[in-house]
Image: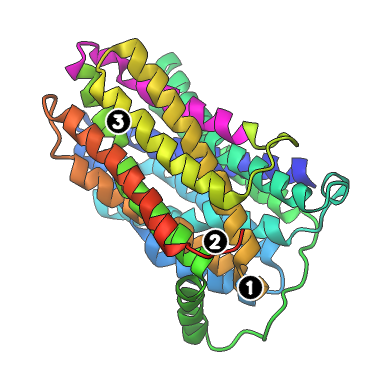
Amino acid sequence: MLLRYTSTAFLARSADEGAAVAMVLLALHRTGDAAPGAFVLAAWTAPHALAAPLTGALATRTRRPRLLHAAALGVLAAAVAVLAATLGRLPLPPVLAAAALGGCCGPVVSGGLSALLARLPPDGTQTGAGEWGRARAQAWDAVTYNAAAVAGPGLVALLAALGSPAAAMPVLAVAAGCAAVLTALLPPVAPLGGPPPGRLRRDLAEGLRTVWRRRELRAVTAATCLAFLGLGGLTGTGVLFAVRSGQGSAGGLLLTAFALGALAGTLLLTRPWARTAPRRLALAGLVGTGAGLAVAAAVPVLPVAVGCFAVAGACDGLVLTATLRIRAAHSPPHRLAQVFTLGAGLKVSAAAAGAALAAAATVHSAPRYLLGIAALQLAAALLYAALGRGARD
């Protein structure tokens, strides 16, 4: 079961991560202007926060959540295919509509699939190790996030270099379509506990109340949103920081080091000896991410910066794994999907706000902005410690 799930999640998340890069490159390739790509990317990202509560509520209410997730991934595949055919060729409004439709499926790709994993029946790997089996499954889920963050954009860059960005979009659509089929083939999920669903509006409100009232969920949600307010600006700031260091072409290297570090951090936690309480993991990860970025800003030497970005990424991988474990452990079964999708939607929104704030950065101010991103990670650690005081792991 775990292999089937991780294959599904990796394909879906690779398509989502790659599409964000491919649509910008495709717009620039076909129009010679980056602005249409930026508008389409905004339309792709913006619906996450609005669609997340509804996605979670619908997943809770349906008797066949696998089919709901498969249908959403099918819509995602169709939206990518439509963008491949229309971006730069048709007027912008219908292209934006297709991007927004695909973006509405974003919460399924992130939090929705993670919530589905928590409801899948344990396989032999899990039952043989008790609670560690569940923790290991969530660690592998975190691996798929970071592996997709490397593989999706990497595939797009490779295909764009060999031919054109137009070649990447159909491949991503096929990947999302395969994920849709694999989702439908996953084992039946465990039934939900708790009271039966009520009115949709009431269920939406109850999902928000659950995140707010449960100390563990409130603490990790607030802390990760604050952390992502900083990390949302890391892409632009990292590129400018590389230029400031005299190696403008190394911006991609810094970001790749961060992504590979995150992948290594999540892989580390799949090993049996890495049994650390998620609360400690989250705190250590936030502090480590902030410290790594702070050292990089203070010592603007490229080899040092690459190493610091890799360490920061590894620590960010710890935070992701801890977050998934905390949500799975402390969410009521009948609110599980809502908690996961709400958390994912809020993080994406915080990252988008961080990217907008970092748009004012310049080559000369990039080290200060990088220090600011590091400071937000440390502030997130303090916030998590304060809000989660007395919480149970």
- Residue drawn at (24%, 11%), measured in percent from left and top? 247
Local crowd at mark 2 within 10 Å, few (<14), some, or many (≥20)?
Answer: many
Helix, strand or loop at disc 1? Answer: loop
> What segment is highlighted magenta in the picture?
244-267
- Depth check: 262 or 285 in front? 285
CA–CA distance between discs 2 and 1?
11 Å
Q: Residue at coordinates 37% horizontally, 60% vertically from top-left?
A: 47
Residue 47 higher or lower than 367, as above or below: below
* Residue 344, horizontal then vertical, whole percent: 47, 56
Front label number (2 vs 1): 1
Left or right of 94, for residue 159 = right
- Tell me the amino acid under the disc marked 3: Ala
Residue 236 lies in quadrant: top left
Neighbour tally class for label 1: few under 14, some 14-19, many 20 plus, Cα within 10 Å: some
Q: CA distance from mark 3 to mark 2?
A: 30 Å
Labelled disc at residue 340: 2
Coloration of the structure image = rainbow
Viewer-closest of 341 and 310: 310
**Which residue is located at x 39 percent, y 23 percent?**
308
Q: Which mark is residue 332?
A: 1
Q: Mark number for residue 294?
A: 3
Mark 2 secondary-structure assignment? helix
Under mark 1, the amino acid is Pro
**Amino acid tagged 2:** Phe
